[in-house]
Image (cartoon, coloured by chain):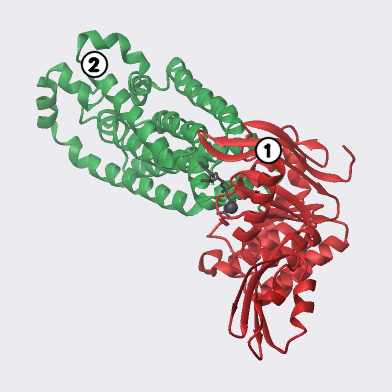
Amino acid sequence: MLNNVFLKTLRDQQRSLLYWALYLIAIAVVMALFYPTISKMTAFNQYLSQLPASVKEMFGAGVVDYTSPVGYFSTELFSFMVPLLLLVFGIGFGANAIAGDEEKGTLGFLLANPVPRWRVVADKFGVLVVSMILLGLFFWGGLAIAASSMHIDISILKLGEATLGSVLLALVFAALAFMAGCIKGSKSTSMGVASGVGVLTYLLNTLGGMVGWLKGYRFLSPFYHYMEPNTLQNGLSPVHILVLAGLVVVFFIISIPAFTRRDIGQ
Amino acid sequence: MNNDTIINTVKLTKYYGKQKGIEEVDLQVQRGEVFGYLGPNGAGKTTTIRTILDFIRPTRGSTTVFDLDTRQHSVEIHRRVGYLNGELALYNDMTGEDLLKYLGNLRGGLDWKYVKDLAARFQCDLPRRIQGLSLGNKQKLGLLQAFMHKPELLILDEPTNGLDPLMQHEFYDLLNETKKAGRTIFLSSHVLPEVEKVCDRVGIIRQGKVVAVETIETLKSHSIRQLEIHFARVVPKEKFSNLPGVRDINVQNNILTCTVVGSLDALVKASAQFEVVNIISHEPSLEDIFMTYYNEGKNNVK
Ligand SMILES: Nc1ncnc2c1ncn2[C@@H]1O[C@H](COP(=O)(O)OP(=O)(O)OP(=O)(O)O)[C@@H](O)[C@H]1O
Ligand SMILES: [Mg+2]
């Protein structure tokens, strides 16, 4: 029974969630299927090891051995593809949650009911977090099953930890888009702000690995806290996780007064 | 403030940046009345309503509903109010039934039998997806969700938008029943005959300012009418000059046109001396009514 904004929002999201989950599982399975071929390409590995450190940085931190399972999955999945996909989903959802409904005019309709504004923010944010975690779980599940049925020598737990890292990274930008929607009520602005900050902080982290004077500022980039611990190899690093989770919480907390204090459009 | 005043706005003012929405609006809506809020496009009707519902915050001034401040107690007020948006936007991917059930659940449950009755009266196709509904059929759903929990106060922004005459009639009946049950209705409109038909009192808003609050009787007695009287023969103009309230007399052969303010009595009696073939009355336009109040307002200042 739909009896609150949380369930209603989750219901609206079910189809999109299903497609994204299938998509992520497909990618996990395909990548696992290709691994045996890659693992035999030792020549490629030698080539990689000759590259200068700054170029390696662009492939993702800590690529010790591309043909090892950890090296392969780090490079192919966790250094770019998975965070990017989750980011696209998260930013879209985050921008749509408040600002999208507001532009459609359905938010004013909802707020005429005896539901406090903070509750609408909290419920929608809750669905955002739950959706991202669900997608992470599906991806991890797909990857774990595929990797173990292919007898790839990699820790299922570490795969889960790396996935959690990606989810948290994406949540930072999703929460940023959500917060921007609460402040301004414009979907396109929210997406623009979150994507823009995403691109800039991504560049800050990668360039920071190569350009000396930027190095000191890398900690400002969420990507740094995601990439630096090399989670697939070493497991989650509590400090970096706390930074990412902290950002998500801060964005959520700002969202509430931002939305409760302003005029609703439409 | 006595507790029969359901809505009370005090110098309510809203500017959108530099753009004026409303200015110093003072309105009192009493328990059990149907209050019409009349004004042309862009006058500030929706702005007033959205401020009362705390969707937008006043630049100055304040409002109480049920003696509760709208800024402090909006949730409690919303619990007791049924609202229909002017620019209705429903969840397109739901069926009417799912939508009403969801909204009912947000209000902690509904008398579903009553909802069914209302749906039957308005011939709502509840199992259909909202996406495919016509404008009028969406509007009917909008009305249903405003009335279905039997709120003490209804705030309806252009409720008859898109309704066909039959459904308008059904809606007027529903208003009457609601009023008889002692509940209060605040509705906006730019259609004068509609307001005359259903309202007890009318507030007239023009360019963000309330220019008059009147009972329907007073409004009618102030109203201007353009009349055209066709006689069987040519009539002398002198017989019609100096009649109280009659202006702009023009006689062409056997047709007399004039403007009448207030009572028609004198003109009708004067006409009765001759053989009358036809009387055509043009409903005064909203603008005429506004002009009367506007000009009177100016005259009073002098
Ligand atoms: N969000 C907004 N931003 C800027 N100006 C606005 C906004 N909403 C309304 N206005 C302005 O405020 C004034 C009053 O508008 P409002 O929508 O209240 O009129 P209305 O009486 O409801 O008109 P209508 O009969 O067309 O619905 C108009 O001049 C309008 O342009
Ligand atoms: Mg309006």
Q: CA distance from mark 2 to mark 1?
A: 46 Å
The residue positioned 32% from the left and 12% from the top of the image is A217
The residue positioned 9% from the left and 31% from the top of the image is A43
Which badge, 2 or 1, is on the more N-terminal residue?
1
Is residue B154 shown left or right of residue A140?
Answer: right
Name the colour assigned to chain B in the rendering: red
Which x, y percent locates residue A111?
64, 44
- Residue B33 vertical position relative to residue A133 in the rendered view, above or below: below
Q: Amino acid at mark 1?
A: Pro
Name the colour assigned to chain A in the rendering: green
Name the residue nearer the viewer: A41 or B15: B15
Mark 2 — residue? Answer: A209
Whether residue B301 is visible to the viewer of this picture, yes or no, is: yes
Q: Are marks 2 and 1 in contact (CB under 8 Å)?
A: no
The residue positioned 74% from the left and 69% from the top of the image is B243
Which x, y percent locates residue B301?
70, 40
Q: Amino acid at mark 2?
A: Gly
Is residue A65 shown left or right of residue B150?
Answer: left
Q: Quadrant of the N terminus of chain A?
A: bottom right
| Mark carried by residue B215 | none
Name the residue nearer the viewer: B14 or A207: B14
The residue positioned 51% from the left and 52% from the top of the image is A14
Which x, y percent locates residue A210?
19, 15
**Ligand 1 lies under 8 Å from the Cβ of mark 1:** no
- Judged from the image, the secondary structure of the residue bearing numbered disc 2 is loop
Mark 1 — residue? Answer: A116
